[in-house]
């Protein structure tokens, strides 16, 4: 059974040109429905992912407190 949706995991802290090239390669193979963002707090310019013109479907959030191990 084929996938219903294809999401691409993106780190907004990477160079926008590198991310666009990688996402473009995936999109050339199959349509990308949404982005999943990880590492958002590690960059001062997270909005660069908007240049990809793909909806953001999920954003990783850091826990309010670190879990006790």
Image: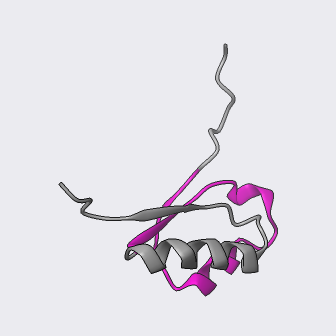
Q: Which residue is rendered at x = 80% and y = 64% of the image?
A: 43
Residue 24 x, y percent position in the rendering = 56, 79
- Residue closest to the far left: 1
Residue 52 x, y percent position in the rendering = 58, 83
Whether residue 4 appears in magenta in the rendering, the answer is no
Picture quarter containing residue 20? Answer: bottom right
Q: Is 33 on the left or on the right of 67, as rendered?
A: left
Q: Which residue is rendered at x = 62% and y = 38% of the image?
A: 63
Q: Is 32 on the left or on the right of 45, as rendered?
A: left
Q: Which residue is rendered at x = 43% and y = 63% of the image?
A: 7
- Residue closest to the far top: 69
Q: In which quarter of the image is the C terminus?
A: top right
Q: Which residue is rendered at x = 37% and y = 76% of the image?
A: 31
How many circles with numbers are drawn on the protein? 0
Q: Tell me which segment is drawn in magenta.
A: 32-60
Visual colour scheme: one colour
Residue 44 x, y percent position in the rendering = 82, 69
> Please, is residue 8 above or below residue 15 in the view?
above
Residue 22 x, y percent position in the rendering = 62, 71
> Please, is residue 15 above or below residue 3 in the view?
below
Which residue is more in the foreground, 22 or 43?
A: 22
Whether residue 39 appears in magenta in the rendering, the answer is yes
> Please, is residue 24 above or below residue 7 in the view?
below
Picture quarter containing residue 45? Answer: bottom right
Q: Quadrant of the N terminus?
A: bottom left
- Residue closest to the far right: 44
């Amino acid at each position: 059974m084929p996938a219903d949706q294809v999401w691409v995991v993106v780190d907004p802290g990477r160079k926008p040109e590198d991310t666009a090239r990688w996402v473009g390669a995936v999109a050339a193979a199959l349509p990308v429905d949404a982005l999943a963002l990880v590492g958002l707090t590690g960059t001062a310019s997270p909005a660069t992912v908007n240049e990809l013109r793909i909806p953001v479907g999920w954003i990783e959030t850091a826990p309010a407190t670190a879990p006790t191990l």
